[in-house]
Amino acid sequence: MSDGISKRALPDDIDLPATIVLYVILIILGVDRAEERQRGQYDVATEEEGLLSDYMDDMSSGSDSDYAKYWIDWFLETKGNEYYCEIDEEYILDRFNLTGLNVEVQQYYAEALDMITDNLEEERFDEKARDQIERAARHLYGLIHARFVITTRGLAKMLDKYKKAEFGRCPRVLCNLQPLLPVGLSDVPVTKTVKLYCPRCEDIYNPKSSRHASIDGAYFGTSFPHMLFQAHPNYMPTKSTDRYEPRIFGFKIHQIAEQHRWQDRAREEYLKKANEKKEQNATDLV
């Protein structure tokens, strides 16, 4: 049986010692790579365990100042709240800065303040009460924000956002993409929504986003942009004197033609009012 098996002969030109050495080198390299992979997996796992341990230590041993930022961070990261800046914890905890706000937030004022500073025991309230406290906290933060942004720290934070054009740029072509600032048309809450003020053309515009357009203007106040340029006059842009001039085939429209159009509009309005008055008198006679 063994005679029937044909044995495969090695080629005559093969170098047997060199082949053996090559196999040994490949085996050694394979072992080294396997050890490196094992060490690499161990190092990654060890690093992840260390980071997780550090994170848990920070959570367990965090100070009150760390906890006080959690609700504010969540609020600022919510879509539509990009116009707000982060209010310093020291400013919120100073009750003098909150004088009179309990009148504006009559329901759940204390609970809303505790929610902002992450001291609220939410398990004490049902879902409906928590929703009401959440709305009160948002409103209270906006009212505090209006006071904070006209302080030195608040102006500095809003200036950084202004320099980055985070509030948008002026849609007027001749303002050359001038950064805008939020401004309120009233200091009374729930009166007017926020507008965007252009310091170059000194006009106001509606925000592009509907989320931003629904923000209460009282959360920024009527004085903020002007206070900012009073404190930082170097950032006041030069006033725009460029005006668009209507032309027809390259020629300016004559002022007399413009005056005639104004007279025609005035005449039409006068006739319209006269007709309405006649109709009203006829109705009274009947």
Image (spheres, rainbow, N blue to C red):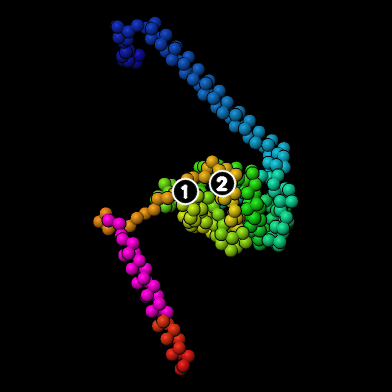
Q: Return the x and y of residue 191 as percentages of the image width and height.
A: 58, 63
Q: Residue at x 56, y 46 (%)?
A: 229
Report if residue 127 is visible in the image.
no
Tell me how many marks there are.
2
- Above or below 4: residue 242: below
The mark closer to the camera, 2 or 1, is 1
Can residue 266 be found in the magenta stretch? yes
Residue that label 2 marks: 229
Nearest the camera: 170 or 247? 247
Q: Residue at x 35, y 6 (%)?
A: 15
Q: Residue at x 38, y 7 (%)?
A: 18
Nearest the camera: 204 or 32? 204
Task: Identify which amino acid the numbered label 1 is placed on.
Answer: Lys
Real-space CA distance between mark 2 and mark 1, rounded to the nearest whole angstrom: 13 Å
Task: Identify which amino acid the numbered label 2 is placed on.
Answer: Phe
In the rendered view, does 265 fall on the left or right side of 77? Answer: left
Report if residue 164 is visible in the image.
yes
Q: Return the x and y of residue 244 as percentages of the image width and height.
A: 37, 54
- Above or below 63: residue 120: below
Label 2–label 1 contact, CB within 8 A: no
Start-end of magenta stretch: 251-273
Characterize the magenta stretch by its predominant secondary structure. Answer: helix
Q: N-terminal of the two: label 2 or label 1? A: 2
Q: Quadrant of residue 260?
A: bottom left
Q: SS for tag 1?
A: loop
- Which image quadrant: the N terminus? top left
Can residue 10 be found in the magenta stretch? no
Q: Residue at x 60, y 63 (%)?
A: 190
In the current view of this chain or complex, which residue is farthest to the front? 256
Q: Quadrant of residue 41?
A: top right
Residue that label 1 marks: 239
Nearest the camera: 243 or 71? 243
